[in-house]
């Protein structure tokens, strides 16, 4: 049986499946660009919880942003789909299943452009959510106002806003609050910039351009949840357990965090519309999302980058194998709690709570992360995720952090192998450097690549010497023995 609203009523009281009442009379308050796995297991999942608790009482109209998509499947399932979340909470396995009911309609603007443009006239739509991939928020010079629809996401937004501006005669109360969830820095600022580019490129009226700026609000966001998507290898068994066939079944981890950056009246409206904390959802409306970005990049992403190369060189293949080894758990704990957290300025309890969740996330038995996959492009990752913590730690303490400095030596040791996968120029540099230089010269050469690191690391007092010592130990003792040495005092 394929999932639809007839089946909804048959499973309404079934077992451990969480279901929000399917209220077809709710106002359509959200226009969503993107029908992929991430938004359905993240933002739409949150809205479903809010609706279940009577805290939002609004539905979502989904727009397919590219020509190929899932709107046809959504329509066949009448907007219903299942989210299966699996992971650890405080080291205890947890499985949650929810039948999400918050999508009222779905629109393919390529198949019915007028249906899409009709959303500009909606009195109830107020919020616009999107996830159109990192490349979605880009300006297209070839888009035209007369395209049905324009190819780019910003182009589609601009034509919709222009129609709304005209229909409501420039009423400044009829703008939208945009919540773009694309994985780029300052996504709201970028979306506003590209929408204005479209409007100017099409020579639209100055009054409309002013209305975009004054009547609409573009938020920056941080999204954090691993969504693994449709479980192809398990689908038959999972659908049998559910009691229906769900072609949109999507899986993800238990952990979630959402931050929306807004100020003034927009912040007040968002806080009232989306009382996440009251619903038990880990999300914040804040006037500055940057500390939360730093927390994620330095602790979560930084922990990955500082550990996976050392683990691989110690014979591990997956993050799960790494987390099964008490030595590497101790290595991670020292690096995160004693070296990374002291460089960040959020409340210590908040940072430590987030750090503890990282251990649950890394040890999640339902997600298999291969170390070599995470090691892809490690040079650029190290620059963003780990190096700032090393520099900040030195500035604050006058010392070099042991684990993080060792992770730089592990990076060099890894790039001495044939397993590194990076830009061709970087691989060529390491091949030449390791063939011609001894350990000290190799480290000095690597540290001197300011085009890699944004600075000459030979100028960081004692850093090159300490890295050289670690690299010599790795060559002599092996990676695991050096990790043991560094964590022995903990």
Image (spheres, rainbow, N blue to C red):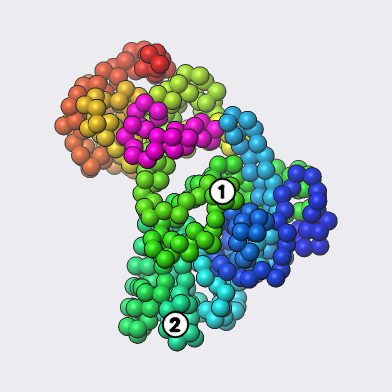
Indicate whether 299 appears above or below 245: above
Residue in view at x 38 percent, y 78 percent: 211
Residue topped by disc 1: 281
Q: Work out which quarter of the rendered image holds the C terminus and state it.
A: top left
User: Which tag, 1 or 2, sits closer to the chain's start?
Assistant: 2
Q: How many C-alpha atoms fall within 10 Å of the one at disc 2: few (<14), some, or many (≥20)?
A: few
Magenta stretch encompasses residue 112: no
For the residues labelled 1 and 2, say whether their Cβ atoms are less than 8 Å apart: no
- Kind of element beneath mark 1: loop
Q: Nearer the viewer, residue 462 or 271?
A: 271
Q: Position of residue 55 (x, y in %)?
A: 61, 59
Q: How many C-alpha atoms fall within 10 Å of the one at disc 1: few (<14), some, or many (≥20)?
A: some
Indicate whether 13 appears above or below 206: above
Magenta stretch encompasses residue 359: yes
Q: Position of residue 120 (x, y in %)?
A: 52, 79
Q: Is residue 346 visible?
A: yes
Task: Looking at this view, name the residue that lies furthest to the right.
Answer: 10
Dividing the picture into quadrants, the one containing residue 340 is: top left
Q: Is residue 230 visible?
A: no
Residue in view at x 39 percent, y 38 percent: 347
Which stretch appears magenta? 336-362
Q: Position of residue 460 (x, y in %)?
A: 19, 30
Residue topped by disc 2: 171
- Mark 1–mark 2 Cα distance, whole angstroms, equals 34 Å
Dividing the picture into quadrants, the one containing residue 386 is: top left
Residue 291 falls left or right of residue 163 = left
Residue 79 falls left or right of residue 411 = right
Q: Nearer the viewer, residue 127 or 332?
A: 127
Overall secondary structure of the magenta stretch? helix
């Amino acid at each position: 049986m394929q999932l639809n609203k007839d089946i909804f009523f048959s499973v309404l009281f079934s077992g451990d499946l969480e279901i929000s009442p399917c209220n077809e009379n709710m106002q359509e308050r959200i226009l969503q660009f993107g029908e992929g796995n991430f938004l359905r297991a993240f933002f739409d999942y949150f809205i479903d919880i809010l609706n279940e608790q009577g805290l939002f009482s609004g539905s979502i109209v989904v727009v397919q942003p590219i020509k190929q998509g899932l709107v046809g499947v959504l329509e066949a399932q009448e907007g219903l789909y299942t989210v299966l979340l699996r992971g650890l909470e405080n080291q205890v396995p947890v499985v949650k299943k929810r039948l999400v009911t918050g999508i009222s309609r779905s629109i393919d603007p390529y198949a019915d452009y007028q249906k899409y443009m009709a959303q500009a006239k909606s009195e109830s739509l107020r919020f616009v959510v999107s996830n159109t991939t990192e490349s979605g928020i880009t300006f297209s010079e070839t888009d035209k106002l007369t395209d049905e629809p324009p190819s780019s996401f910003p182009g589609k937004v601009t034509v919709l806003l222009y129609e709304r501006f005209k229909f409501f005669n420039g009423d400044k109360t009829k703008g939208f609050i945009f919540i773009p969830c694309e994985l780029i820095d300052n996504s709201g600022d970028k979306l506003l910039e590209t929408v204005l580019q479209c409007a100017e490129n099409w020579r639209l009226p100055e009054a409309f351009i002013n209305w975009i700026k004054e009547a609409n609000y573009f938020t920056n966001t941080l999204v954090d949840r691993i969504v693994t998507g449709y479980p192809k290898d398990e689908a038959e068994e999972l659908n049998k357990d559910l009691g229906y066939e769900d072609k949109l079944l999507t899986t993800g981890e238990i952990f979630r965090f959402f931050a929306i950056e807004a100020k003034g009246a927009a912040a007040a409206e968002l806080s009232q519309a989306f009382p996440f904390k009251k619903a038990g959802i880990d999300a914040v409306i804040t006037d500055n999302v940057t500390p939360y970005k730093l927390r994620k990049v330095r602790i979560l992403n930084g922990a990955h980058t500082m550990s996976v190369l050392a683990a691989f060189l110690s014979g591990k293949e997956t993050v799960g194998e790494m987390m099964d080894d008490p030595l590497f758990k101790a290595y991670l704990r020292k690096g995160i709690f004693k070296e990374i957290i002291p460089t960040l300025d959020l409340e210590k309890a908040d940072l430590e709570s987030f750090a503890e969740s990282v251990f649950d996330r890394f040890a999640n038995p339902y997600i298999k992360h291969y170390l070599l996959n995470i090691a892809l492009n490690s040079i650029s990752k190290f620059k963003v995720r780990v190096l700032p913590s090393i520099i900040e730690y030195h500035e604050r303490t006058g010392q070099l952090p042991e684990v993080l400095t060792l992770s730089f030596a592990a990076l060099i040791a890894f790039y001495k192998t044939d397993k590194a996968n990076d830009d061709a120029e970087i691989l060529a540099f390491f091949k030449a450097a390791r063939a011609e230089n001894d350990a000290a010269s190799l480290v000095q050469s690597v540290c001197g690549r300011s085009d890699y690191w944004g600075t000459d690391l030979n100028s960081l007092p004692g850093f090159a010497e300490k890295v050289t010592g670690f690299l010599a130990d790795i060559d002599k003792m092996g990676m695991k023995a050096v990790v043991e040495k560094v964590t022995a005092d903990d």
